[in-house]
Image: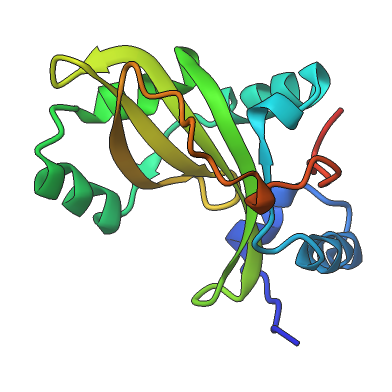
């Protein structure tokens, strides 16, 4: 079994009343590690809850990997372009990943900006709701609607945590 730990900073972000609740949530999330829920499978309540949580973050940090991707791919995007994606976007998917370095489960949301960059592309951004960091970015052509999407990767019954 994978180990789970919480730093004081992480623990406070969860706003649980005590560590046992945080640990219980982490254990429940373990059931969904590697699973995804496509936006078409999200309820309106789940979408609104995720957007509320994303938009509630005061400042998104961008990890080195995301900065490297911007440079490698020649993406014409500033910090403001990336951070503002949460205000002008479509949710693409919700997923749970296990962060081996931090030894915890993380909720991540993939967003597609409605704005156009590099002349004919939309910026796609992966946000970690737990670390409040931008994990990676890439571009998709504005007309790309993923006709070849592998639906076997998605679970319509997956729980979306934090839905109110």
Relative placement, left or right, of 120 versus 163 is left
Q: Is residue 75 above or below residue 69?
A: above
Quarter of the image with the C terminus in it: top right
Seen in the picture, residue 25 relative to 16 is either above or below; the reply is below
- Left or right: residue 44 versus residue 128 is right
2 left or right of 99 in image: right
x, y (%) of residue 5?
68, 76
Q: Is residue 63 above or below residue 42?
A: below
Query: Which quadrant does the N terminus fall into?
Result: bottom right
- Which scheme is used to colour this image of the protein? rainbow
The residue nearer to you, when weighing 23 against 44, is 44
Residue at the spot 51% in from the left edge and 37% down from the top edge? 110
Number of labels in the image equals: 0
Q: Nearer the viewer, residue 63 or 9?
A: 63
Residue drawn at the location 71% of the way across and 77% of the way down = 4
- Which percent across, then down, holds residue 47? 71, 23
Query: Where does the image place residue 55, in percent across and percent down from the top left?
Result: 56, 23
Q: Residue at x 66, y 22 (%)?
A: 52
Q: Residue at x 60, y 50 (%)?
A: 130
Q: Position of residue 157 (x, y in %)?
A: 86, 43
Q: Residue furthest front?
A: 148
């Amino acid at each position: 079994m994978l180990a789970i730990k919480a730093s004081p900073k992480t623990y406070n972000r969860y706003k649980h009343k005590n560590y046992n609740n945080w640990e219980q949530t982490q254990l429940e999330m373990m059931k969904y590690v590697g699973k995804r829920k496509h936006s078409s499978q999200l309820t309106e309540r789940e979408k609104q809850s995720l957007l509320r949580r994303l938009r509630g973050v005061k400042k998104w940090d961008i990890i080195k990997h995301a900065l490297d991707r911007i440079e490698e791919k020649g993406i014409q995007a500033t910090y403001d372009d990336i951070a503002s994606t949460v205000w002008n976007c479509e949710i693409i998917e919700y997923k749970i990943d296990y962060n081996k370095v931090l030894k915890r489960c993380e909720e991540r949301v993939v967003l597609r900006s409605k704005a156009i960059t590099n002349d004919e592309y939309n910026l796609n951004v992966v946000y970690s709701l737990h670390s409040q960091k931008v994990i990676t970015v890439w571009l998709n052509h504005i007309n790309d609607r993923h006709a070849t999407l592998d639906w076997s990767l998605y679970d319509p019954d997956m729980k979306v945590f934090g839905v109110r």
